[in-house]
Image (cartoon, rainbow, N blue to C red):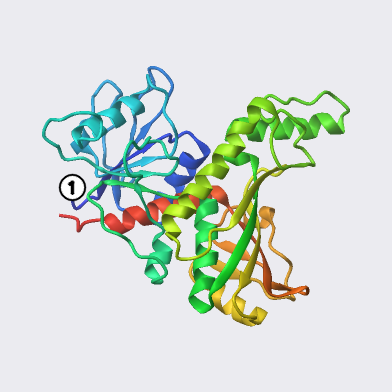
Amino acid sequence: MTSSRQGYRVGVLGASSLLGQELLRVVKDRGFPAAHLFTFEDEEDLELPVVDLAGKAEPVRADEELSPGDLDFLFLAGRASLASSGAAFLRRVLEASGRGGSHGPRELTPWIIDLVEAIEETAAPAALRIPFLERAGRAAHAPSESRTIGSPHPAAIVLSALLSRLATRFPLHSAVAQVFFPVSEVGPRGIEELQKQAVNLLSFQKIPQTVFGAQLAFNVLSRLPGKHAAGLEGFEDRIRRELRQYLMESVPLPALQVCQVGVFYSLAFSLYVETEKPASPEAWGAALQGEHVQLRRRSEPAPSQIEAAGSGDILVDNVTLDPEHPTGGWIWAAVDNIRLAAENAVEIAETLREPLQ
């Protein structure tokens, strides 16, 4: 690593995205020792600034080419266009590591933490990490020679956490999960269209449908129409794939459905789980409690997507047993999708840190 007493050199590709901006805030909020922070953007002729978190660095312009060894960590928080400076740098990093088609000697490269599956794997997928589950002993981190680590989609993080924690207390029979997606998963375009739809509906004007292809304001859609369907289906496929890879048959994989809802931020979950034997709601709650999970009492209001915004904690309502199925229970949960994704990625970097020289 090129670390020094001042800290690490950190790059963020996609820093202008919602996820990239939140990642920068988490780096600052958690006090991650980043002496230099490089942000890559897609716009042509944009400067490549170096933000000095310690107030000591000189700015570096985009025409000063970085080499792969100039960074300790590279976060992928967006998919760069092929002609962008970020995409060019990522290609150099992959080539230096021997993963970009180059057969030359491998060079010193940064740890890559991929939040958005920006790297298309041709062989084995990147190892997935959820540090707060690893710390609790509910997941084992398998060492890998690859310097690319995948940070799962926040929906996969939540479902992995809830199911694996339950499985440590009692065997699970089956699970069914509905995930309610906010428009922030699409990005600023989705937020803008939902806002315009709401305003236009209330003023009896025609609503825009460029992003979602249908009225989403004051509505819930189990699928999007026509050419718009691929986006939601892609998220659903990713969550299934990451659950399968991360949980590795340690618990029954849930039957999954992703629905698009007319809210701006935060994921919500309706999770039905059947155990092998009946258990009390108190036993379910005791199993679910832990780092990154806040459990509600029956006397408290149920968590909502609005309330969850701004926090990386998973808000879980009091478990409700199904009266017709004595081994079945319903779990309602909500979490800020962008904050949880950013916090998990930075926590991964924290586990990879080497002592500052």
Residue 261: quarter of image = top right
Residue 108: quarter of image = top left
Question: Toward the viewer: 292 or 25?
Answer: 292
Amino acid bearing label 1 = Met
Where residue 77 appears, as percent x and y from the top left, is 43, 39
Question: Toward the viewer: 152 or 120?
Answer: 120
Question: Toward the viewer: 245 or 350?
Answer: 245
Find disc 1 in the rendering and name its residue. 1
Question: Toward the viewer: 262 or 282?
Answer: 282
- Does residue 309 show up? yes
Where residue 145 appears, as percent x and y from the top left, is 22, 50
Q: Is residue 21 left or right of residue 319?
A: left
Where residue 55 appears, as percent x and y from the top left, is 31, 43
Q: Is residue 184 left or right of residue 30?
A: right
Up/down of 147 relative to 234, above or below: below
Residue 212: quarter of image = top right
Q: Residue at x 43, y 44 (%)?
A: 115
User: How many residues crowd mark 1 within 10 Å: few (<14), some (14–19), many (20+)?
Assistant: some
Of all residues, the one furthest to the right in this rendering is 204
Q: Residue at x 86, y 33 (%)?
A: 202
Where residue 236 appears, as percent x and y from the top left, is 57, 44
Up/down of 13 relative to 169, above or below: above
Look at the image and tell me in which quarter the C terminus lies.
bottom left
- Does residue 28 show up? no
